[in-house]
Image: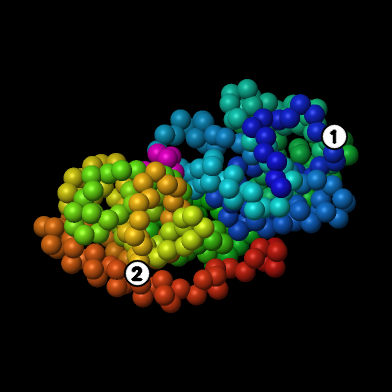
Amino acid sequence: MTRFYEDLPEKLTEPLWITIGNFDGLHLGHQVLLSRLLSLAKAEDMQSGMLTFWPHPRVFFQRTDGPFYLTTKGEKQELLKQSGLDLVITLEFNQEIADLSAEAFFDLLTSRINLQGLVVGENFALGKNRSGTLDVIRHICAERGIQLEVLPPFSLDGGLVSSARIRAVLEEGDVRQAARLLGRYYFVRSKVIEGKHLGSKLGFPTANQVALEQKILPKYGVYATYVRWNGERYQGITSVGVRPTFEESGKPNIETLLLDFTGNIYHEELTVEFVHFIREEIKFANAQELIDQIEQDKIVARRLLSNEPYPQNLPSQPQSAQR
């Protein structure tokens, strides 16, 4: 079972291989790196760990308060529970950490953990102003007897897999490509809130969710989705947008119609997985036009989801991916 620390522990004596980074989204490139880390740690009968940061350094430096994250802190932790890592350390990224040189950062790290090995990607750098380049880190590791493994970037479908690339395809509503790059469907996990019951009045009771403001949502529109709740998976239709027909709220809302489901799920936590883009968000002239469109959306969603070749539509597991 993975152990989680919200700061560097006082002292961990067991020998440890780690990786360091932000790991937003835990996409296929990250998974390849973690797979290699686990393999190296196991070969030497050592523990495996991750050191990650919150907030993301870009969020900290740019004072970003709009959508940025592919995974919230809670979502990332849920994914990491399935990673096979022995421990995950989340370090608060603040000015004190930002001002550390690479040498000082390693001083801090090795005073708290028994660091024996480090796995990073070719674009990795740390320390103030990213001055700790790979050449600097190689020198530091050599001096301290720390093994270092550097992995080349991971590519898929003609380009490098990166969090930035996934953010870009989500902005286009291309949740199919996002799933390819993530190795799983892009998802939002949050509690169902009680809304204005507009869906119920139209005969389509929906589950309304509000995501963390900094969580990236796919482009406004209607999507065929899978909805996970209480250990079950349901087919759904999810609208992401501002409800232009009725209120034009200005604040993004996630509204999901679960197909073939009846029940009260207010205040329950749902995971909505985005599978297919169906259509753009539309402002209808009246309620009946919206009702007619929802009936069409249901037909399209059932067809798409019933023919969904999950998981064959996604890349193979990263252990077998070429690096």
Is disc 1 placed on a helix, strand or loop?
Answer: strand
Q: Which residues are magenta?
A: 209-216
Tell me the chief SS of the magenta region.
loop
Residue matched to label 2: 301
Image location of residue 178, percent across then percent down:
48, 60
Q: Position of residue 164 (x, y in %)?
A: 50, 50
Who's the residue at 46% across and 55% down the image? 229
- What residue is shown at x 62% (from left), y 28% (from top)? 98
Q: Magenta stretch containing residue 158, yes or no? A: no
Identify the image's colour scheme: rainbow, by chain, secondary structure or one colour: rainbow
Residue 110: give x, y in percent of width and height: 80, 31
In this view, the residue in front, 52 or 127, is 52
Residue 181 image position (x, y, % from top left): 54, 60
Q: Nearer the viewer, residue 236 or 173?
A: 236
What is the quadrant of residue 64 in the picture? Answer: top left
Specify the amino acid type for callout 2.
Ala
In the picture, measured across the screen, residue 262 lies left or right of residue 94, that is left
Q: Which mark is residue 13?
A: 1
Task: Report, in whole angstroms, how far the alpha carbon at label 1 lies from the one at label 2.
Answer: 53 Å
Disc 1: CA contacts within 10 A as few (<14), some (14-19) or many (>=20): few
